[in-house]
Image: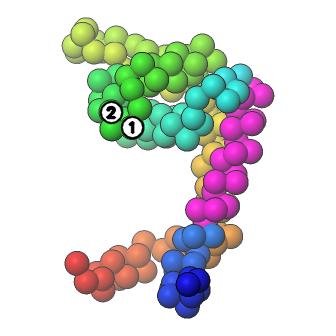
C-alpha cells in the first residue's frame, strides 16, 4: 500500500515541504556554526544547540533572561543536564553567551546572549523565514486569527 498524496491538504503539503527544507537549511547552518567555532563539529546535536540559542535569545528580548534551572526544565525529557551544560560551555567559550549571577537571587545564573550571537541568530531566523515563505507562508495576523477561530477543537 502506498500513501495517496491526496490525503494531505495543500497546507499540510506546504508544512511538509517547509520541514524538509528547514532540515536541509539546518544542516548547512550546522556546518557554518562549526566553521565559525560556535559549536564543535559533529560533537553534539545542532538541533539542540538551535533550541538553546532560540530560547536564550527569545527570553532576553522579552526582558526576562532565562535561568540555567529553567533551561534545564525545557530539555529534561530528551537530553541530560550534562549535555545541556556542554552546549552552554561551547556557546560561552565561543563568546555567544555569558552566565551572569542574578542580582535579585545570587543562587541563580542567568543566560545572556552577547552581540556575537546576533549574526548567527539573524542568519538562522532569516533562513527559517525564507523556508516558510518558499513554502507559501504569508504573515497576516488577522487571517491567522480567522483560521484558528474556524477550527474545531
For the residues bearing labels 2 and 1, Cβ distance under 8 angstroms = yes
67 or 15: which is nearer to us?
15
Q: Is residue 116 above or below residue 18?
A: above
Residue beneath disc 2: 76
Residue 121 rendering spot, x and y as whole percentages: 60, 39
Distance of label 2 from label 1 (alpha carbons) = 6 Å
Verify whether residue 51 appears in magenta.
no
Mark carried by residue 97: none
**Which residue is more in the foreground, 26 or 127?**
26
| Residue 87 position in % (x across, y down) | 52, 24
Q: Residue 78 carries which label?
A: 1
Residue at 64% in and 54% down = 23
Furthest toward the top, the residue is 106
**Which secondary structure, mark 2?**
loop
> Magenta region's main secondary structure?
helix
Q: How crowded is mark 1: few (under 14 residues within 10 Å), some or many (20 or more)?
A: few
* Residue 22 image-quadrant placement: bottom right
Q: Name the residue located 67 percent from the left edge and 30 percent from the top edge.
A: 42
Specify the farthest residue to the bottom: 6
Identity of the residue drawn at 46% across and 23% down: 83
Q: Check disc 1 and report its element: helix, strand or loop.
A: loop
Q: Quarter-wise, where is residue 120 in the image?
A: top right
Q: Does residue 63 appear in the picture of this structure?
A: no
Would residue 136 appear left or right of 24 to someone viewing this image?
Answer: left
Q: Where is residue 148 in the image (x, y as percent from the top left)?
A: 33, 78
**For residue 35: magenta?**
yes
Span highlighted in magenta in the image? 18-36
- On screen, residue 147 versus residue 54, left or right, reads left
Amino acid at each position: 500500500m502506498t500513501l495517496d498524496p491526496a490525503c494531505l491538504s495543500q497546507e499540510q503539503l506546504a508544512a511538509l515541504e517547509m520541514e524538509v527544507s528547514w532540515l536541509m537549511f539546518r544542516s548547512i547552518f550546522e556546518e557554518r556554526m562549526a566553521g565559525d567555532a560556535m559549536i564543535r563539529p559533529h560533537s553534539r546535536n545542532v538541533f539542540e544547540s538551535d533550541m538553546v540559542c532560540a530560547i536564550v535569545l527569545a527570553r532576553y528580548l522579552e526582558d526576562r533572561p532565562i535561568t540555567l534551572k529553567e533551561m534545564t526544565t525545557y530539555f529534561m525529557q530528551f537530553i541530560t543536564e550534562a549535555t545541556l551544560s556542554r552546549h552552554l560551555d561551547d556557546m560561552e567559550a565561543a563568546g555567544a553567551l555569558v552566565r551572569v549571577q542574578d542580582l535579585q537571587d545570587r543562587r541563580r545564573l542567568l543566560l545572556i546572549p552577547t552581540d556575537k550571537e546576533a549574526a548567527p541568530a539573524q542568519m538562522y531566523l532569516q533562513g527559517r523565514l525564507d523556508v516558510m515563505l518558499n513554502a507559501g507562508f504569508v504573515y497576516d495576523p488577522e487571517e491567522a486569527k480567522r483560521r484558528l477561530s474556524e477550527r474545531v477543537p
